[in-house]
């Protein structure tokens, strides 16, 4: 009964989404206030029904209703409760439901927080989001219904993929989707503005907080995914340039370009057509990412071709969304005047370089991700693009961008004098060099050119962020939250660069055979293997190793890496053990038993790896902080003083 | 030309130059890092390059896995059911590496035509067959049928 209720709620949500997507658009075109006023209640109703549907599926998981195919395929009575709940989005159908659910949450937020917007604008924005929702709900109902029944019901479920039984999976997908789907708000604003022909600084101010919040969620989501891979895959890596990762990284790169270009559009009225195009791209890449991950093309282009139902649907949806929005853009953009002139050296021009670098990077990542798929689809051979490609393109592009972070905020809008800016920057650059060299000198005795350069740049970014904050605070003004947020995020970028650089250059990885009592010393830490014992988990058995770590004779930690075998999926899983530290992680994982109680063991020393995630979280926090700036709310209050102003415009 | 125009022209020139350099960089790196996939039959027939990294995939042959006493050096053969080739690897193998399992290895041929793998991938699903391996086996099967006996 409950699953049917969920299914029915989903169908009702689709009906409301259709109403929400079509009627307000017609109303906005004809100036019909009644039709426009439908947008809000339709969106709110849609949210209620999708939430009901989501809760129904969650309920089926909690009570182990194995008469539902999706539950039987992804859960088990022995699965702990928290993983039964997170298993809701552990596979295809449920993660689509999560997508639709988060889209309705964002739409609900738009209906609540945009009371000050002209009614025509808000009607169009909500309608565009409704149309996107129609696509996803249809997709789910036609090809991937999570409520399909299994008859006869299974006695026991097939269990959740052991890789996904990790705290990282509870938070990573919802956070990532908050970011992905959040770009639909910026997209809807851009499309609404294109339809209405009102592209001005106010438009940028409306869409800016939404874009920044979704960007922050995406940043946190990607960081969580990386942290999960580090914990769970047992190789101690944090990023693999895997197509699935790239699929989430592409919208991030374009989204980063978008939040910077929105700043220019809001403050100076420049870059308007470009900003709109970026908003379209950011959301299109989110959809592309969904397509890549959800259609199965990554597993095999040919499997996709032989079972095309799902893939063709998303591909068609992708083509319709991107095609129609680009067509609209081509039709409307020439009428948009790009105001706000600026000279060759100004904050605008530096932000333009920022955008160019980010877009070139996004293009290179896209090339490396799609090229093998295209070749394979055309039967031109099977190739793959190795991770060194991405690293060798990414690093030389990102380092100059990081250098600019320290110069941009020093530079004035419209026009500035390059030599005076440089003169002001030099003392900080000098400080960065001295600090980095001193730090590297105490840490290590060999420094490559690239390591040295990257460290200097990382420190430079951090120093510049602090410098900007202090300089602004000294002027005696109240610091705007947007400014604090920006500095916080840039500080995070610096930490991230340092983390990546130092982990990459100075990590020590040893794979070795360890008998009971074998000692190995890396980076001053002595690891001693104390053997392996059997332990029982809720739905697995594990060989649990014990290693104790000492430094100069003093005990540091005892680590318990495990090799688990899950009972239902009979699949072995490596569970690493990590001693976490601000400046270094000690990471061990078990390989295989060799003979007489000996095991092959991975023993890793990872300096500064925490800085990668700490830096990313600071970026995300900075984004959230910036989006809470008073400026966005002042505009709201002002408009509320003149309640009749909005309808009058319509 | 006014100084302002000149400055703007210089600026646009710099950006174009920058994009050009970046694209050149990307394409060179792209060429260098393309990894081709070969089936065991192709490798056995000498179609795979010497001294350049590539990927090879197939089923790990039953009974072929031997480990040296250091616990890390592993030798095994992979097959596409038509032909098989030997592979060595030093390090810890992925969780799902076992006999009969489809795997993909990345590495180079050494002077004795022995494939030295830097990386061995086995996907995280016991029933999963890497698509390349599935294709390789299908291809090997198809070669046998139309040509009959060699």
Image (spheres, coloured by chain):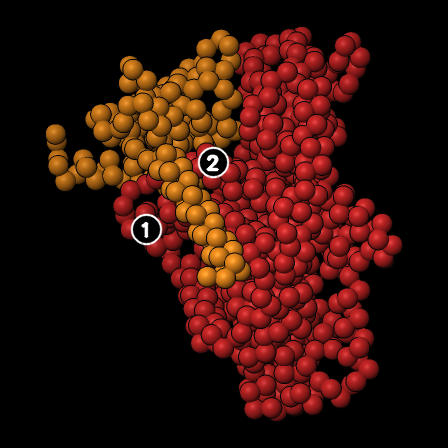
Chain colours: A red, B orange
For the residue pair A74 and A555, the one nearer the viewer reads as A555
Which residue is located at x 53 percent, y 14 percent? A594
Q: Is residue B35 left or right of residue B124?
A: left
Work out which quarter of the rendered image holds the C terminus of chain B and state it. top left
How many residues crowd mark 1 within 10 Å: few (<14), some (14–19), many (20+)?
A: some
Marks 2 & 1 on one chain: yes
Can residue A329 be seen here? The reply is yes
Residue A136: image x %, image y %?
53, 66
Q: Which residue is mark 1?
A: A377
Mark seen at residue A301? none
Name the residue rendered at 44%, 28% in the picture.
B120
Q: Is residue A407 left or right of residue B135?
A: right
Mark 2 or mark 1: which comes first in sequence? 1
- Give coordinates of residue A275: x percent, y percent: 56, 64
Residue A392: mark in rendering: 2
Q: Is residue B92 above or below residue A537?
A: above
Front-most of residues B124 and A264: A264
Residue depicted at x 60% and y 18% = A446
Q: Quadrant of residue A43?
A: bottom right
Observer-side mark, 2 or 1, equals: 2
- The reply to whether the C-beta atoms of the residues labelled 2 and 1 are less than 8 Å apart is no
Instruction: Tell me the crowding category of disc 2: few under 14, some 14 to 19, or many 20 or more residues within 10 angstroms, Cα based.
Output: some
| Disc 2 chain ID | A
In this view, A522 is above or below B13: above
- Quarter of the rendering containing residue B46: top left
Residue A2: image location, x then y, percent: 65, 65
Residue A292, visible in the rendered structure: no
On the image, the x and y values in percent for residue A480 come to 80, 58
Residue at 52% x, 58% y is B3
Q: Chain of mark 1?
A: A
**Relative to A551, A287 lies left or right:** left
Indicate left or right for B121 with A508 as reference: left
């Amino acid at each position: 009964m409950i699953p049917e209720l969920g299914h029915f709620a989903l169908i009702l949500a689709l009906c409301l989404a259709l109403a929400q997507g079509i009627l307000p658009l017609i109303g906005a075109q004809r100036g019909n206030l009644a039709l426009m006023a439908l947008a809000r209640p339709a969106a709110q109703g849609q949210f209620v029904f999708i939430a009901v549907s989501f809760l129904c599926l969650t309920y089926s998981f909690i009570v182990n209703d194995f008469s539902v195919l999706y539950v039987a395929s992804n859960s088990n009575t022995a699965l702990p409760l928290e993983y039964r709940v997170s298993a809701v989005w552990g596979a295809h159908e449920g993660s689509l439901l999560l997508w639709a659910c988060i889209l309705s949450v964002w739409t609900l937020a738009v209906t609540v927080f945009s009371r000050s917007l002209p009614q025509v604008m808000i009607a169009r924005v909500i309608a565009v989001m409704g149309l996107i929702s129609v696509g996803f709900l249809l997709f789910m109902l036609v090809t991937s219904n999570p409520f399909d029944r299994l008859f006869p019901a299974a006695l026991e479920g097939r269990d959740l993929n052991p890789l996904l039984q990790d705290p990282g999976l509870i938070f990573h997908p919802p956070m990532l989707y908050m970011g992905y789907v959040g770009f639909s708000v910026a997209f809807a604003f851009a499309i609404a503005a294109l339809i209405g022909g009102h592209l001005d600084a106010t438009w940028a101010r409306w869409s800016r907080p939404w874009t920044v919040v979704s960007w922050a969620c995406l940043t946190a989501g990607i960081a969580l995914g990386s942290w999960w891979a580090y914990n769970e895959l047992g190789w101690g890596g944090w990023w693999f340039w895997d197509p699935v990762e790239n699929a989430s990284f592409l919208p991030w790169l374009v989204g980063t370009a978008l939040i910077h270009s929105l700043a220019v559009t809001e403050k100076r009225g420049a870059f308007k057509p470009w900003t709109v195009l970026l908003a379209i791209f950011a959301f299109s890449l989110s959809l592309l990412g969904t397509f890549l991950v959800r259609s199965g093309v990554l597993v095999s282009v040919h499997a996709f071709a032989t079972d095309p139902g799902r893939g063709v649907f998303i591909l068609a949806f992708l083509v319709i969304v991107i095609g129609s929005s680009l067509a609209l853009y081509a039709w409307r953009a020439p009428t948009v005047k790009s105001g706000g002139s600026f000279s060759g050296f100004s904050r605008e021009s530096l932000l333009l370089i920022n955008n160019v670098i980010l877009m070139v990077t996004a293009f290179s990542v896209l090339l490396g991700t799609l090229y093998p798929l295209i070749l394979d689809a055309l039967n031109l051979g099977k190739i793959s693009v190795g991770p060194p490609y991405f690293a060798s393109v990414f690093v030389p592009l990102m380092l100059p961008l990081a250098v600019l972070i320290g110069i941009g905020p020093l530079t004035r809008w419209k026009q500035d004098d390059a030599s005076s800016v440089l003169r002001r920057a030099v003392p900080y650059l000098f400080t960065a060099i001295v600090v980095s060299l001193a730090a590297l000198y105490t840490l290590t005795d060999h420094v490559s050119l690239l390591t040295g350069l990257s460290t200097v740049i990382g420190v430079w970014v951090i120093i510049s962020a602090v410098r900007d904050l202090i300089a602004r605070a000294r002027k005696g003004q109240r610091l705007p939250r947007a400014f604090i947020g920006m500095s916080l995020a840039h500080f995070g970028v610096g930490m991230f660069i340092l983390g990546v650089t130092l982990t990459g250059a100075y990590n020590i990885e040893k794979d070795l055979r360890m008998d009971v009592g074998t000692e190995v010393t890396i980076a001053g830490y002595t690891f001693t293997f104390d053997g392996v014992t059997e332990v029982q988990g809720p739905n697995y058995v594990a060989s649990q190793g014990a290693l104790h770590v000492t430094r100069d004779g003093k005990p540091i930690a005892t680590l318990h890496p495990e090799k688990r075998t899950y009972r239902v999926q009979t699949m072995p899983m490596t569970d690493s053990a990590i001693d976490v530290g601000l400046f270094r992680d000690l990471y061990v994982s078990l390989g295989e038993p060799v003979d007489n109680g000996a095991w092959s063991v991975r023993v890793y020393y990872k300096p500064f790896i925490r800085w990668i995630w700490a830096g990313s979280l600071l970026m995300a926090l900075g984004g959230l902080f910036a989006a809470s700036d008073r400026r966005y709310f002042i505009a709201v209050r002002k408009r509320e003083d003149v309640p009749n102003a909005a309808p009058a415009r319509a | 030309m006014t100084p302002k125009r000149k400055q703007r022209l210089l600026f646009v020139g710099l950006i174009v130059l920058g994009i050009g350099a970046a694209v050149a960089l990307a394409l060179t790196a792209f060429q260098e890092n393309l990894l081709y996939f070969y089936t065991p039959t192709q490798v056995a027939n000498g179609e795979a390059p010497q001294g350049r990294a590539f990927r090879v995939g197939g089923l790990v042959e039953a009974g072929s896995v031997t480990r040296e006493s250091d616990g890390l050096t592993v030798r095994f053969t992979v097959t596409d059911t038509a032909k098989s080739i030997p592979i060595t690897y030093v390090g810890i193998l992925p969780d799902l590496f076992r006999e009969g399992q489809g795997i993909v290895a990345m590495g180079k041929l050494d002077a004795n035509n022995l494939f030295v793998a830097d990386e061995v991938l086995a996907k995280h699903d016991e029933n999963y067959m890497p698509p390349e391996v599935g294709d390789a086996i299908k291809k090997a099967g198809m070669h046998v049928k139309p040509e009959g006996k060699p």
